[in-house]
Amino acid sequence: MLEALGLDTATEAVYRAMLAEPRDGAADIARRLGTTEEAVRRAWERLAGLSLVRYADTDGDRDGHRDRDGDGDRDGDRPTGRPEPVSPALGLDHLVARAQTELEEHRRRVAAARITASRLASEYAELSARTTPVTVEHLPDVAQIRARLAALTDSVRGEVMVFAPGGAQTEANRQAARPLNERLLGRGVVMRTVYLDSVRNDPATVAHARDLTGLGGQVRTVATLPIRMTLVDREAAVIPVDSEDSSAGAVVLTGQGPLTALCSLFETVWETARPLGDTARRADDGDELDRQEAAALRLLAEGHTDEGIAKRMGLSHRTARRIATVLMERLGARSRFEAGVRAVQRGWLPSDL
């Protein structure tokens, strides 16, 4: 439960045992947990490194190093005395503060990288557009889209990147994609796919994604995706003409300028996406938002209806309405405009939204 703070399951169990019976030694703890004394001492070392235990004076040696053979020398640098547990109110607060600092620093780095990537993509796209022709191939229906994707699959040399919005995938889409994915990954092609967080609630889509990872693909999820697209070898992009209506067909874009910008967009989203096996973290104090709530709040403040939010996030209309209602209640807002203002005041949305 405390892995995010640096405690693995075994170390946490030892720490909890020490808090329950502070006078127990390594042998007592090992017996209670069904492990070895050596494992307990290794856990003590990790806990000491996290400042969750401290070594008291032991047998005349003030730093806890014990002279077992009586020769006046310490037996190695490893403490052998019984440490005392530090109160969770102090030790864990310190670890949480450190984790929060690291998270904020990571967010700052990602934000700076996103700005830099956007600028570079724009500058490079302008430069490339002068020398590299851009081609647009129109695919008028789903059958031709699938045929073109199959042809691209046969010719791909090294990498495929996919945005797959729209929530749960249909059985027809899964059946059509499976043989293509198997051919790609069987040839050693790197394949990265980003779904919406909402697919985690659909067992069939999760099973399809796990099949993909089992073949060697990489799968992550985000709360919202800007478009549906497939990028092949960073040289061609398949993008729907109308993201709301797949029957309207798609286009295949080539040309260094557009592809550089689209690849930069993919990498930015991939960096912030969550691997399929990870579980969402929720704040316990009710003063923070999870990823889904944050995305819904931004769409709410931008003026999207419940139906629009549902489509963008791959949710049912009922679920989108429930999330919007809960957010407005938490903010004490009577209108969506007021919700946006209060969210900015609370720091849940940027002031320049």
Image (cartoon, grey):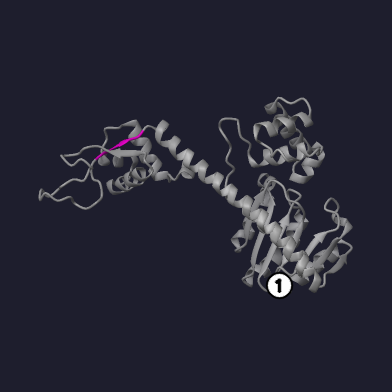
Residue 143's spot in the image, x, y percent?
85, 64
Point out the image quarter for the C terminus.
top right
Q: Main secondary structure of the magenta part?
A: strand
Name the image quarter holding residue 213: bottom right
69 to 52, vertically: above or below: below
Q: Is residue 62 magenta?
A: no
Who's the residue at 27% across and 46% down the image?
37
The quadrant holding residue 35 is top left
- Given the image, on which type of amino acid does mark 1 rest? Val
**67 on left or right of 304:** left
Which stretch is magenta?
82-86
Above or below for 116 versus 95? below
> Tag 1's secondary structure?
loop
Coordinates of residue 347 in the picture (x, y in percent): 65, 35
Would you say residue 272 is visible in this rendering? Answer: no
Q: How many marks?
A: 1
Q: Residues within 10 Å of mark 1 (few under 14, many from 20)?
A: some
Instruction: Determine whether, in the image, residue 135 is placed left or right of residue 295.
Output: right
Q: Nearer the viewer, residue 6 or 43?
A: 6
The answer to if 83 sits in the magenta stretch is: yes
Point 60% across, 30% down: residue? 286
Instruction: Tell which of 331 and 112 is nearer to you.
Output: 112
Looking at the image, the residue that sits furthest to the left is 71
Q: Position of residue 148 (x, y in %)?
A: 81, 68
Quarter of image, res 26 = top left
Residue behind mark 1? 156
Asked whether, in this view, residue 1 is left or right of residue 153, the answer is left
